[in-house]
């Protein structure tokens, strides 16, 4: 459904060749880090307006921390 998240931190947005990103994500110009991921998990449209990802965001800070910590382990 989405790009592989292994090695996400330190990677530029829309940089994997094996996934077709939305134009909005392709235009986004930042490198993923914990702060960016947390912002995206809270409100994807706020961080990357126009992203086509079918995800409304998360409200629970513990869940956001847990997801971020898990993704950090994917190397």
Image (cartoon, rainbow, N blue to C red):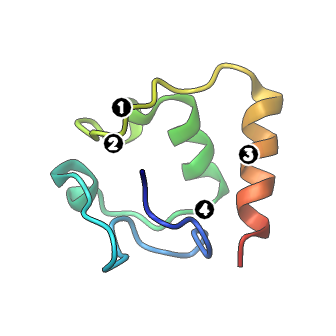
| Residue labelled with disc 1 | 45
Residue 35 placement (x, y as % from top left): 62, 50
- Mark 3 touching mark 4, by CB under 8 A? no
Camera-nearest label, 2 or 3: 3
Task: Give the spatial CA distance, label 3 vs label 4.
Answer: 13 Å
Q: Quadrant of residue 67?
A: top right
Query: Is the residue 72 above or below the residue 50 in the image?
Result: below
Task: Give the spatial CA distance, label 1 vs label 3.
Answer: 18 Å
Task: Give the spatial CA distance, label 4 vs label 1.
Answer: 17 Å
Q: Earlier in the sequence, mark 1 or mark 3?
A: 1
Residue 1 placement (x, y as % from top left): 42, 51
Q: Residues within 10 Å of mark 4 (few under 14, many from 20)?
A: some
Query: Is the residue 8 above or below the residue 62 in the image?
Result: below
Q: Earlier in the sequence, mark 3 or mark 4?
A: 4
| Residue labelled with disc 4 | 33
Residue 43 placement (x, y as % from top left): 48, 29
Task: Give the spatial CA distance, label 2 vs label 4.
Answer: 15 Å
Residue placed most toward the observer, 22 or 19:
19
Residue at x 46%, y 23% (from the top left corner): 56
On-image quarter of the C terminus: bottom right
Q: Residues within 10 Å of mark 2 (few under 14, many from 20)?
A: some
| Residue labelled with disc 2 | 48
Q: Earlier in the sequence, mark 4 or mark 1?
A: 4
Query: Residue 67: which numbered mark, if any?
Result: 3
Residue placed most toward the observer, 19 or 72:
19
Q: Secondary structure at mark 2?
A: loop
Q: Secondary structure at mark 1?
A: helix
Q: Quadrant of residue 12?
A: bottom left
Query: Is the residue 9 above or below the residue 60 in the image?
Result: below
């Amino acid at each position: 459904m989405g790009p592989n998240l292994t090695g996400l931190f330190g990677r530029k947005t829309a940089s994997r060749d094996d996934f077709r990103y939305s134009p909005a994500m392709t235009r986004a110009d930042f490198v993923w880090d914990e702060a960016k991921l947390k912002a995206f998990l809270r409100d994807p449209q706020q961080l990357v307006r126009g992203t086509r990802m079918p995800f409304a965001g998360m409200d629970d800070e513990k869940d956001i921390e847990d997801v971020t910590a898990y993704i950090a382990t994917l190397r």
